[in-house]
Amino acid sequence: MKVKEILGEIADKHRAEFEELYYLLEHLNPQSAEILFFYAHKIQIRSYGREVYLRGLIEFSNVCNRNCSYCGIRRSNKEVERYRLTEEEILACCDEGYQLGYRTFVLQSGEDSYYDDSRLVSLIHGIKESYPEVAVTLSIGERSYESYKHLFQAGADRYLLRHETASETLYQQLHPGMSFQKRRQCLQYLKEIGYQIGAGFMVGLPGQENEDLVKDLIYLQELQPQMVGIGPFLPHPKTPLGGFLSGTVEKTLVLIALTRLLLPESLIPATTALGTLDPRGREKALRAGANVVMPNLSPTEIRGKYELYPNKICTGDEAAECRLCIEHRIEDSGFQVNMGRGDHLEWRR
Ligand code: SAM
Ligand code: FES
């Protein structure tokens, strides 16, 4: 009974206390999770209707100066064949994406200092000159305030920087040489500068408890990001966490749905990691409150090299095939594809 009451209240007020969320994570069962998904779905429809937004993802470099313990392209993994795309190659991906109807390009990479501000500014200008109406999303890690500002002034619209985990202890264990406070500071800077920001976390990290996941939700509630990426942790054999179990589909869906209740207008991707864990994972996410999908636009020759975790889906498919495949999946789940920029509602008012 108590679970239903708490769910009803959060769905109504879009706010929750630590203890309530903790109680839910400890006591939800398959039946009460259905009630949660029902509320999440209702709120999603109220905010964005049946629209699911498509973003074209370009993984332009797998070179990374960081050594996150879970990540397949971490600096210490010497078995990765590293690549960097040139500005021309990236623009060619955008061109193909534009022809396929994409109006948001997500530029993602490891933390690669080769792409300094001047290279990135030139790239952003190149994209905006050819396609003034598209949104450019960056997902290139931690940088200085000045750098974020330069890139924003050059025309970047959005920035994805998952907080990864809101547990300070876990964060410090997983990110050698990095700082929990610094990551949060970066998110604050991005918000202040005026980007639509994306935070997010992994579910099922080794050592992660329900208490830690509640901290993630409370942090999102405070930060109020426009986008939230939530995916299961998937062990990569060439990392220190290779021997651990992956996160589960069920738990990831519960966290997506709770995020939809707390941040009713957020843009939440049905992540590739979820689609990798379960062939119907992305469809399940859409029915649990997600409303974004990010098909890959990177050249097929390099896709396999951006291996954050093993067996990543869609590494062999041409952009056009991905576009069609995902459209069918979205429609089969009872939603419709929206190829527009898909800004957060606040940006449309
Ligand atoms: N370097 C940028 C950054 O740090 O934000 C963007 C690229 S990073 C590879 C993108 C995301 O992949 C990370 O935020 C992390 O959550 C996710 N990721 C990396 N390794 C993963 C794994 N083994 N399982 C699940 N997700 C993973
Ligand atoms: Fe790429 Fe399905 S989304 S093949």
Image: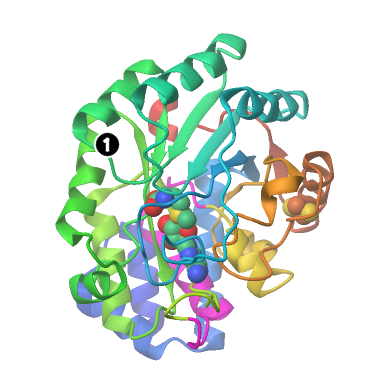
Q: Is residue 330 visible?
A: no
Q: Is residue 61 above or below residue 20?
A: above
- Residue 320 is a magenta residue: no
Based on the displayed image, in which of its 4 quarters is residue 30 positioned? bottom right
Judge by depth and name the residue closer to the eye, 60 or 168.
60
What segment is highlighted magenta in the picture? 242-268
Q: Is residue 24 above or below residue 326?
A: below
Q: Is residue 345 left or right of residue 170?
A: right
| Residue lying at 22% horizontally and 70% vertically, measured from the top left | 172
Q: Position of residue 251 (x, y in %)?
A: 49, 79
| Residue lying at 54% horizontally and 15% vertically, measured from the top left | 126
Judge by depth and name the residue closer to the eye, 246 or 10.
246
Residue kind at label 1, given as amino acid type: Leu
Q: Position of residue 201 (x, y in %)?
A: 39, 63
Based on the displayed image, in which of its 4 quarters is residue 150 positioned? top left
Q: Position of residue 238 (x, y in %)?
A: 52, 75
Q: Is residue 32 left or right of residue 207?
A: right
Q: Determine which residue is flagged by label 1.
A: 190
Please tell me how many numbered marks the rendered image carries: 1
Based on the displayed image, in which of its 4 quarters is residue 299 positioned? top right
- Residue 244 is a magenta residue: yes
| Residue lying at 34% horizontally and 82% vertically, measured from the top left | 208
Q: Quadrant of the C terminus?
A: top left
- SS at mark 1 in the image: helix
Residue furthest top in the image? 129
Q: Is residue 265 visible?
A: yes
- Number of residues whose C-alpha sits closer than 10 Å to that of mark 1, classed few (under 14), some (14–19) or many (20 or more): many
Judge by depth and name the residue closer to the eye, 74 or 137.
74
